[in-house]
Image (cartoon, helix red, strand yellow):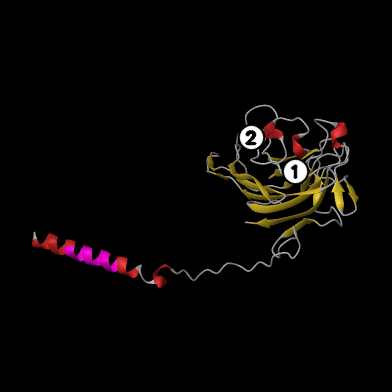
Amino acid sequence: MKKIFYQLALAALSLGSFAQNFKVPKTTEVWEPLPKIVTPATTPGGAPSDATILFDGSNMNGWQHTKDKSASKWLLKDGAMIAKKGTGELMTKQEFGSFQLHVEFNMPLDSKKVGYPDGGNSGVFLHGKYEIQIFDSYNNEVPIYANGMAGSVYKQVIPIANAMLKPGEWNSYDIFFTAPKFRYNGSVETPAYVTVLMNGVMVLNHFEIQGTIQYIGIPSYEYYSGKGPIALQEHGSEVAFRNIWIRDL
């Protein structure tokens, strides 16, 4: 009995000492590792020092067509690349895992005249699989289902805000993407997540992506490496893109 009492007393003293230690600031201070230094851009939308430039307006050398990996047939004009009708989808030659992506895009002035579905219609595909929709959703004037509006993960979620600018004005997406992870047997260990800012306004907040985009049917995951390209959709509309950069996370 005395031995048990002695052990309990020692435990109480230890806990008391432990609690006392946490009253000292140094106990909770972690000094290493230090974060790497990243120099921010000096202009809005500019690339920080550790970013990979995917398109700076000078050439399209980092891009290729998704079907045959041929050189881009999109129009390069005034520092932008424009999705000419019938030229097909582009993707980066590089592949990425989790990342921060900045993309600027501009709706054609005649998007409302052309109308749905080809008026001001495009998309940014993460890993070539998960589409952040681009659509002329300015003022909700063009009728389209809510989970197909600009800022949605296409047919998976309605954006929490519509911050789209009118055709002819440059919009921006800042996309924060966490790549999915798969188990050895191909099942999903952790799904992909995405947060999206449109023109500085959060429109998706850590949304759990349900799987590869499906126009018809239910999305699902299929095993892959967890890396993939960035792809831009050509959907019969001359949407323009500029100032595209990415940071590995």
Q: Which residues are magenta?
A: 9-18
Residue 164, disc: 1
* Residue 166 in view in this figure: yes
Amino acid type indicated by mark 1: Met
Pointer 1 and pointer 2: residues touching (CB < 8 Å)?
no
Q: Nearer the viewer, residue 55 or 200?
A: 200
Instruction: Pinpoint residue 241: horizontal percent, then vertical percent.
Output: 81, 48
The structure residue drawn at horizontal position 61% and vertical position 67%, both measured from the top left corner, is 36
**Mark 1 and mark 2: Cα distance apart in space:** 19 Å
Left or right of residue 177, residue 113 in this image: right
Circle 1 or circle 2, nearest the eye = 1
* Residue 225 in view in this figure: no
Residue 156, disc: 2
Q: Nearer the viewer, residue 155 or 72?
A: 155
Left or right of residue 195, residue 42 in this image: right
Instruction: Pinpoint residue 193: horizontal percent, then vertical percent.
Output: 59, 45
Secondary-structure class at tag 2 = loop
Instruction: Pinpoint residue 212: horizontal percent, then vertical percent.
Output: 65, 37
The structure residue drawn at horizontal position 85% and vertical position 56%, both measured from the top left corner, is 57
Number of numbered markers: 2
Q: Quadrant of residue 73?
A: top right
Left or right of residue 33, residue 15 in this image: left
Disc 2: CA contacts within 10 A as few (<14), some (14-19) or many (>=20):
many
